[in-house]
Image: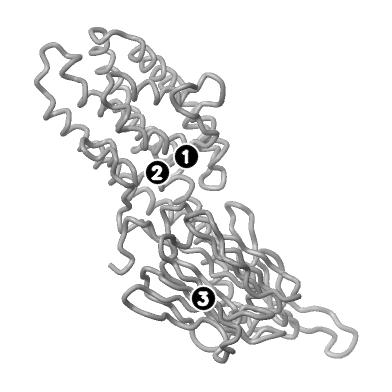
Amino acid sequence: MGEVEVSDSWNNRLKTLAEGLASMIPTVGKVVKVAIQLFWPDDTEDIWSLIKSQVEHLIEVKILEHELDEREAQLNGLKQSLSMYSDATNKERASLLSAIIVQCNELYSELTESDNTIHLIPLTVAHAYLHLTVLRERYEHGLKLYSDATDQDQWEKDLTTKVSDYHSHFLSVYSQWQEWREDEISVSVKTKKKPMGIPPFFYWTAYGKTKDSFDGESVKYSESWNKNKKTFKDVQKRAKLRMYNEANASMMMDAFIRTFSLGNFLPGHENDAAKADTTVSEVSYGPYSVALTKGDHEKKNMATIIGQELKDNNGVITEIHIWAGNFVERIQFHYEGKGAGHAFGAPKVSSKSEHVITLSDTHVTGMKMGFSNGVMARVQFKFSDGSSSDAYGNRGWRMKYKQEVDVDSDFRLVGATGRKGNGPGAVGLAEMMFNFQHISVDPSS
């Protein structure tokens, strides 16, 4: 492509546009030319096709496809107008730019006012970048293009207003999407008589099921000789929380994170770091445990939770203390200005099994975990500089369940929640949930 590298990810294409604004804006038409290359490249799929194929796990893609089909002529017309603008002389560009802005305004209204707006989030995010590109082009070069223009203050106001409009829309629609996504996950219980060969010739079995209707995932529980429908109430609730948290984090990392850079289109803010609104700056992963994984679970193989759930307040993590031998006995995070957080896991540990990770110029962006015999048996942390810690625990244990978490490097681990448990083989860390927050937000606020 020459000027820009065109990623095979729609998300990364938008990131490329935002990060290159400062160098492209000073030249008339350059940012528009690059936008065309990123949205409609000659030798690979356009951004709209990538969105359709890469957001199936986030929204109802059939609805998105329908909306794209309905607007195919509009998008093709917009592409043609932008291409004509890119190739035109400055004298010819004035009328073209005005027409392009009208086209973008119309598409903005249709996308944000649609009854299907929650399923159009990725599409609307992409259009926001295109829309703000042309508004910034007019602000930056309008005085050169329009011979009698004196409206730069109004153009700046239009640009600022539209950034604010998009910001408000995305906050609102994200909340609506979250409600929809949570409602897709249901919890059901039942008891059933099972036959046996001696009087009374049957016994009761209790069942619980947590199911995500959107992606088909389900977690099932059972216990023989039990007719109490409330047996799995707590674990089903937590399985639903795990499913929802993972879905919410996927929307954030795979689409919504790009809205944090809309402010870069404003004059004087081209080089600003991405900034998250505090109300949508945090995502959680988990809770993770053997009992919350996809599949069928018998109560006898689940850890018995000991004591209450412990939760750290968010903060900047400076150290991670891990006690591990055959399995992960305990994890404790230390926070800047706060000291040690809760000790998640076994109440008694040996100092000989302690390992300390000190964080200075990096932050935690993920982890690998393994669970066996009801408790966490292995853990390894990932960092924003691309490195990883040693793997702690797992001396000969077979991992029944493995879990990996990865976030964008603009997010950092800021807190955790844990519960200790008595598994079939050991007393240790039975369950963990991790909180990540965008680095633009003070986790202590």
Amino acid tagged 2? Arg
> Compared with residue 396, is residue 46 higher up or lower down, i.e. above or below?
above
Residue 442, given in percent of the width and then of the height, sits at 30, 63
Q: Is residue 30 left or right of residue 178?
A: left
Amino acid tagged 1? Asn
Marks 2 and 3: which is nearer the front? 3
Q: How many angstroms separate mark 2 from mark 3 (CA)?
A: 35 Å
Give me the disc on residue 258.
2
Secondary structure beneath label 3: strand
> Residue 16 occupies which quadrant of the picture?
top left
Residue 250, given in percent of the width and then of the height, sits at 50, 52
Total marks in image? 3
Is 259 in front, or is 219? 259
Graded by Cα atoms within 10 Å as few (under 14), some (14 to 19) or many (20 or more), the crowding at tag 2 reads many
| Residue designated by label 1 | 11
Q: How many angstroms separate mark 1 from mark 3 (CA)?
A: 36 Å
Q: Is residue 76 left or right of residue 274?
A: right
Secondary structure beneath label 1: helix
Residue 334, given in percent of the width and then of the height, sits at 42, 76
Q: Is residue 206 left or right of residue 150?
A: right
Is 154 in front, or is 415? 415
* Residue at 27% over, 12% down: 93
* Residue at 41% over, 71% down: 318
Amino acid tagged 3? Val
> Compared with residue 85, is residue 12 higher up or lower down, i.e. above or below?
below
| Residue designated by label 3 | 356
Please report contact status of discs 1 and 2: CB closer than 8 Å, yes or no.
Answer: yes
* Residue at 51% over, 81% down: 344
